[in-house]
Image (cartoon, grey):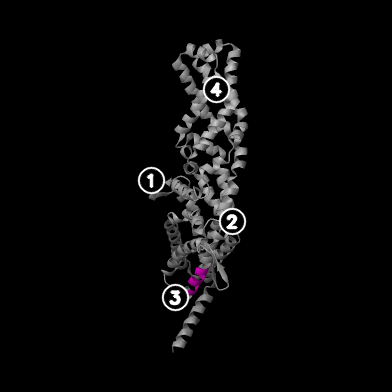
Amino acid sequence: MEEAAGLGLLAKAWANFRGDIWLYLSMPITSGIVGYVTNVIAIKMMFYPLEFLGIKPPFLGWQGIIPRKAGKMASIACDTLVPRLITEREIFDRLDPDRVAEEIERPILALVENLMEEIMTEYQPTIWETLPVAVRNLIIKRVQDDAPEVVAQVMNEIRNNIETVFDLKDMVVTTLVRDKQLINTVFQETGKQEFKFIGNSGFYFGFAFGVLQMIGWTFYQANWQLPLFGLLVGYATNWIALEMIFRPLTPLRIGPMMIHGLFFKRQKEISRDYARLIADEIVTPSNIIEAVLKGPYADRVFNMIAKHIKRTIDEQSGVARPFVAWTVGTKRYVTMKEAAVSRIVAKLPETVRSIDGYAKEAMDLGNTLASRLEVLPAPEFEGMLRPAFKEDEWILIAVGAALGALVGVGQVIAFKLLGSGAASAAGQAVSALARTAGLA
């Protein structure tokens, strides 16, 4: 009796399948599309929009997780760099102060000449114009003569006190927070293959769930089934993909198969991409100089530079100094020196861009970081990309599940309204659409 009942159930299921074959065959395809679309949407939601879009308070809109938490993301990513892989001292120890002075000698000389003319014309135009041309040129020439030596002295002093005048982590975080698209690029480029896998795997896992859904629907049809399967597909495809990317940390053999997290399989390739981005876009010579001059220790750097420049102006003014001090007044003379120092410091970032080529080659950050990242232990290496997924990961999975459930509700409504014949035609259209999307 039980055997006959079982055969009867199978026969009924087979009849249902044959009667609406296109409807049933569309289920795995639809489920695959749901898995793919929800995963892709989840990825997009990590990065976009860059700024909050919607009506505040925040639950009435959305901002990409990474841009919204750019400071925290940058800080976490930076923890992998500093001080485990590179330090402020190591960066500056690779720069030769004399070579730096040589590289920027021409723009520094031009800067000194322009600023001397600018300062004197602004503060005491009459006196400056009445000075003999030879005296004016002598003042400028003497300051220019000592400029390269002053640059070398300042570089030496900065290098000797690097920990008190330069904060590498602050520079990296400031740069990434200021440019939200840049921090997006760091995560997108570093994990480009992993993000692609998440999208594609959504279709395959969704298809597999859809096969189970199809089989279940042939035996038992209830309104709650399709929304439930849609919810499971949206939830599970995201969760499974994330687990496959980051687990296991180390290779694990199961029978003939070797299982290893996709992110760690690509450690060498990811290390090269990550190091290139850091060296080319973030820890650049220009950004370093700007961070030294404008960072949290800017006052110390300013005083350091001011000390050398003021001394040089005093020493090299020669016979003209007493005349200038007498004619403009000692306080006025001091004020002029202060203005000269301030404007030199303000123009230095632009002036020292001429050392970018030498500094980039000397620091060799790209190769240094790549070689060290390649041998980084798996738990530390995971910290480079995992924060992008970990932060508010539950929201992304919940969104995927909700979208999947809504699609399931839509399926139920469509099946009820269209009837089997129309549903069959709809199934063919969905199937064709899914094949197109799959090929794309």
Helix, strand or loop under label 3: loop
* First in residue order: circle 3 vs circle 4: 4
In the figure, 434 relative to 218: above or below? above
Helix, strand or loop under label 1: loop
User: Which picture quadrant has residue 320?
Assistant: top right
Label for residue 31?
A: none
Q: Residues within 10 Å of mark 1 (few under 14, many from 20)?
A: few
The residue identified by callout 2 is 268
The residue identified by callout 3 is 220
Q: Residue 178 at what x, y percent from top left? A: 48, 41
Q: Residue 432: within the magenta?
A: no
- C-alpha span from label 4 to label 2: 49 Å
The residue identified by callout 4 is 115
Label for residue 56?
A: 1
> Which residue type carries mark 4?
Leu
Most foreground residue, 108 or 160: 160
Main SS of the magenta part reads helix
Which corner quadrant holds the C terminus? bottom right
* First in residue order: circle 3 vs circle 2: 3
Most foreground residue, 227 or 153: 153
* First in residue order: circle 1 vs circle 3: 1
> Which residue type carries mark 1?
Lys
CB of mark 4 within 8 Å of CB of mark 1? no
> Which residue type carries mark 3?
Tyr
- C-alpha span from label 1 to label 3: 45 Å
Which residues fall within the magenta stretch? 208-215
